Image: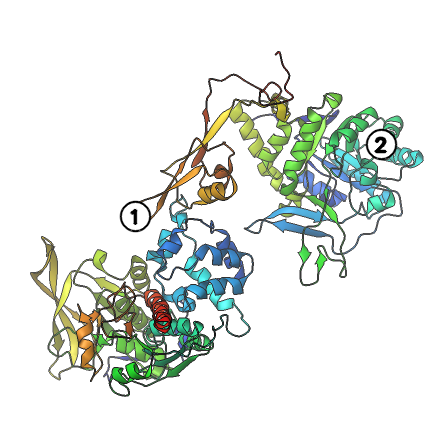
Amino acid sequence: MANLKTTFAGIKSPNPFWLASAPPTDKAYNVERAFEAGWGGVVWKTLGEDPAAVNVSSRYSATYDANGQVVGFNNIELITDRSLEINLREIEAVKKHWPEQALIVSLMVPCVEDSWKRIVKLVEETGADGLELNFGCPHGMPERGMGAAVGQVPDIVEQVTRWCKLHSRLPVIVKLTPNITDIRFSARAAKAGGADAVSLINTINSITGIDLDQMVARPIVDGKSTHGGYCGPAVKPIALNMVSEIARDPATLGLPISGIGGISNWRDAAEFIALGAGSVQVCTAAMIHGFRIVTEMKDGLSRWMDSKGYESLEDFRGLAVANTTDWKYLNMNYKVVANINDDTCIGCGRCYISCEDTSHQAIAKLPQPDGSNRYQVIEDECVGCNLCEITCPVSACITLEQREAEKPYLSWIHDERNPHREIGH
Amino acid sequence: MSLQPPLIKISPTRELNELFSDIHPPLTPRQAELESARCLYCYDAPCVKACPSEIDIPSFINAIHHENIEGAAQTIYSSNILGGTCARVCPTEILCEQSCVRNKEAECAPVLIGLLQRYATDHAQFEGHPFSREPETGKRIAIVGGGPAGLSCAHRLSMKGHQVEIFEAHEKAGGLNEYGIARYKMTEDFAAKEVDFILSLGGITLHTEKVLGRDLSLAELQAEFDAVFLAIGLQGTRQLMLAHEALETVQNAVDYIRQLRQASDLSELDVPRRAVVIGAGNTAIDIACQLKRLGSEEVTLVYRRGAESMSATAHEQAIAKAHEVQIKTWSKPEHLLVDDAGALVGVEFRSTAMDQGQLIDLDTTYEIGCDAVFKAVGQTLVLPENEGGLSSLVKSGKLAVNSEFQTAIPKVYAGGDCTSVGQDLTVEAVQQGKRAAEAIHSFLILADKA
């Protein structure tokens, strides 16, 4: 079986699956259970200065797919609601008990150097492996000048990161908020401040839905609500994009990335790693299924790596980065058209109506003697958009086939249809 | 039927509804949520093409999934006002569910359209009736027969603003829904509730125990009304043409089912210990299964051809097997056997076979002992007494109509089982009633313009 051992920003763990800083890592009891279940590391739920935060009831809400499975998860919890001292003593004990597992401590204190200096020293004394700076929490804490309020200002990200590097010998991971316009600015700021790594994404500002009887968003706290932080499978595409933006930004080249955002299975993890992540952090999947879910994640990843001949994570880490590029570098001469396999087509007509109503009228409906219809792609009209393939309920019934393969690569930069093209290349 | 031992007397303490509980229990809200998610919302939905009443199935299932139960029910009722009955009795396995595209995938399992339709119609809560009537046209239409075809026609005509009067021969309207459907398919008083629901539209007057040819004549109806719709069903039953057929222990299946459906106390029923059912349609299956539920020890269903020729669907045959009904094929009844006292003791069958496309008798015979025989070999059109004029309409044993459900008699339309249009299914009757109503409406409007 492939080797899942991970070294991330100098922190070693038996596998890349870490539990993200969140309710599952709130106290020793949970973290012990997580390590027993096989998690490679945990990021302890964010510590702050005493007095500890106080949470409200209720705290979570979700969005669901057609089968009732959670696709998105929203929370309005604050950082730990237990005292700093209790947390520090538990961290110390857990680390002693589980020396092989990565134990990173998430931190959030006011933007005052002394506050950060004091807390990083205290954490260092516990024997923890690293620090994660919570600059991402989007609800509650920003109202007090912390969390995303810090992460949204690159100068402050850089400043706080620098304080932590100055006062601690531990690796510093800066956790980034996605509630910004361009993630690269905060990543560059973290790097400039000396960060050993970044982790992303934190949760996205969200309202999951409205209770139409009570006319209030969920979760409901005595008839009122507030926006929360969104996570779970629904945010994975946003997270993958932000990871790729940082991975391919020359300014942050080589900066270790811990991928976070909707990772629910081995394939999700492999995708983040393919975009350059050195470890992955999971929360929602564990909160929905319990810690045991890591068993299938590790096994699936190992078997897939075996099937591809990858012996270690480094063998495929970042392989998809170079293929993620700007639109202007895409090949204008590449042409695919859809093909519908009559043998597996079930005749639902979804491809037809989606193309006819909303795309390029490139599918013909051909009446058959038995009253059914046959569907055929009109190649001259087909732009290869993939919509029919996406709406088709049958796996691999509609495929996109390449045409005009003989033409050479041509980017928009040099395409004669581009009025601003570069001439002479 | 007064039968001597060895007949079983059902204990009156056994709960009727328990004994005839739903054969397909309704979906729970959670099941409906999950099942409705399986619908692909096909654009080219073959289920709609397969539905004789043209219900927009993807639309109502989508509405169920998004908790718009009243919207789902209204979609169903707008095509089929007896959608509640059809959800229970339609042979979905040869209609919508057979054509569901989900059959074609590796999963080979259709969306449970019938049960979803039942979910919508059972759970919808309307304030008043879901449809309104157009302004009064001043036209009056007489409908003879308050079964599915008559009710469907009446509802649609009333929606169009016409006044409708239904003349029903029996005590209650509903037709086979009330008197003929197996009790485990239509439990409790659903048929009566559905009639009430349809009539709640208004504009429809129901006259019960009014028999054409006895209490009223077609000539009177023609004179008094702007149009007449005949939906008289099939009131006759085919006979075996054997000696001793007049015995009380040799019954028409439909008569026994009617008695069972109307019984409020099972002790009213005589239940044979061993029964033979002759026939191969859904009525044969219904009587056989109900006898088993009532406590008959041995029920043998006998058919003169092979299982593949049975008009009962494979699904219905499976229900019979699940009730431990014995099915014997390639046998035809030759003698009803009686003892010295003249009581039925069994049936002698002759084996049959197919020879060059012809059903032939073989030399072998055998006997099946039984205490009662139930005949389910088909229903036939019986013309009302004193209505000789109708005999001119009969072609191949049924009333002949054109594509607009018009008979050869002016202003007189016909639909449902009494005509030769379509198969004799409830859903077909509903559709014919609805289409006949549209045709009558067009006719009356045209007549006005002219």
Residue A75 position within the rendered picture, expressed as x and y whole percent measured from the top left: 73, 48
Task: Look at the image and tell me in which quarter the C terminus of chain A lies.
Answer: top right
Question: Where is mark 2, residue-wise?
Answer: A124
Query: Can residue B358 be seen here?
Result: yes
Residue B205 position within the rendered picture, expressed as x and y whole percent measured from the top left: 40, 82
The amino acid pointed to by label 1 is Asp
A212 on left or right of B390: right
Question: Where is mark 1, residue-wise?
Answer: A370
B211 on left or right of A96: left
Q: Nearer the viewer, residue A213 or A236?
A: A213
The residue lying at 66 percent from left, 32 percent from top is A241
Residue A33 position within the rendered picture, expressed as x and y whole percent measured from the top left: 69, 42
The amino acid pointed to by label 2 is Glu
Where B366 falls versus A4 (above or below)?
A: below
Where A284 falls versus A174 (above or below)?
A: below
Q: Quadrant of residue B438?
A: bottom left
Q: Chain of mark 2?
A: A
Q: Nearer the viewer, residue A87 or A112?
A: A112
Query: Can residue B11 be seen here?
Result: no
Residue that lies at the very extreme toward the left in this rendered image:
B363
Residue A300 position within the rendered picture, expressed as x and y whole percent measured from the top left: 56, 33
Label 2 or label 1, whichever comes before in sequence order = 2
Residue that lies at the very extreme toward the right in this rendered image:
A114
Alpha carbon separation for disc pair 2 and 1: 76 Å
Badges 2 and 1, same chain: yes
